[in-house]
Image (cartoon, grey):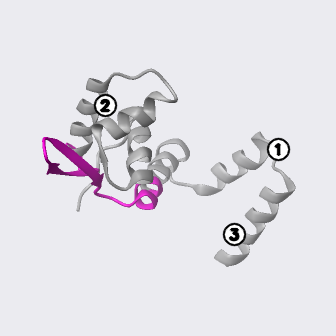
Amino acid sequence: MGTTPALGARELAIMKVVWKLGDASVRDVYETLRKERSVAYTTVMSMMGTLEGKGYLKKRIDGRAFRYRPARPEQRVISGMVREFIDRVFDGASQPLLAHLVSARRLTDEEREELRRLIDEAE
């Protein structure tokens, strides 16, 4: 399957809405997004067309409108974005990212415990 083009911040916001809804029209996505920020309907429509072109969305006709659904699972897209970030910023090494996350912000007791649990499970 080749490399999938990266998602920009606004594209990711749209994808999060479609993943949450499972099946959505442009109007559905627009109405959801505008609760959080100002966005034009035509911008959402254009970006959803771009996301379809990039292979992130599939569309079908429903009456006079298109309905969109995710073409890729959310976890696979996020994993790819994290891998790309680690490759670009940390030259592919995960340890510096983890060290940065632990040292750059105070972790709650619950977050530290969860991190320990995940490390134990990985071993």
Q: Residue 68 carries which label?
A: none
Task: Tell me the quarter of the picture where residue 50 sits.
Answer: top left
Within 10 Å of disc 2 (Cα), the crowding (few <14, some 14-19, many 20+) is many
Residue position marked by numbered label 1 in the rendering: 106
Q: Which of marks 3 and 2 is nearer the N terminus?
A: 2
Where in the figure is residue 48, as x and y percent of width and height?
27, 38
Q: What element carries label 2?
A: helix
Mark 1 element type: loop
Q: Residue 54: give x, y in percent of width and height.
A: 23, 45
| Residue that mark 2 sits on | 44
Instruction: Report the magenta residues as a range.
Output: 53-79
Q: Cα distance, mark 1 to mark 3?
A: 18 Å
Residue drawn at 44 percent across, 28 percent down: 34
Pick whichever of labels 1 and 3 is earlier in the sequence. 1
Q: Does the magenta stretch include residue 74?
A: yes
Q: Nearer the viewer, mark 2 or mark 1?
A: 2
Q: Mark 3 points at which residue?
A: 118
**SS of the residue at dot 3?**
helix
Mark 3 neighbour density, 10 Å: few (under 14) some (14–19) many (20 or more) = few
Residue 59, percent from left and from top: 19, 50
Residue sitting farthest toward the front: 63
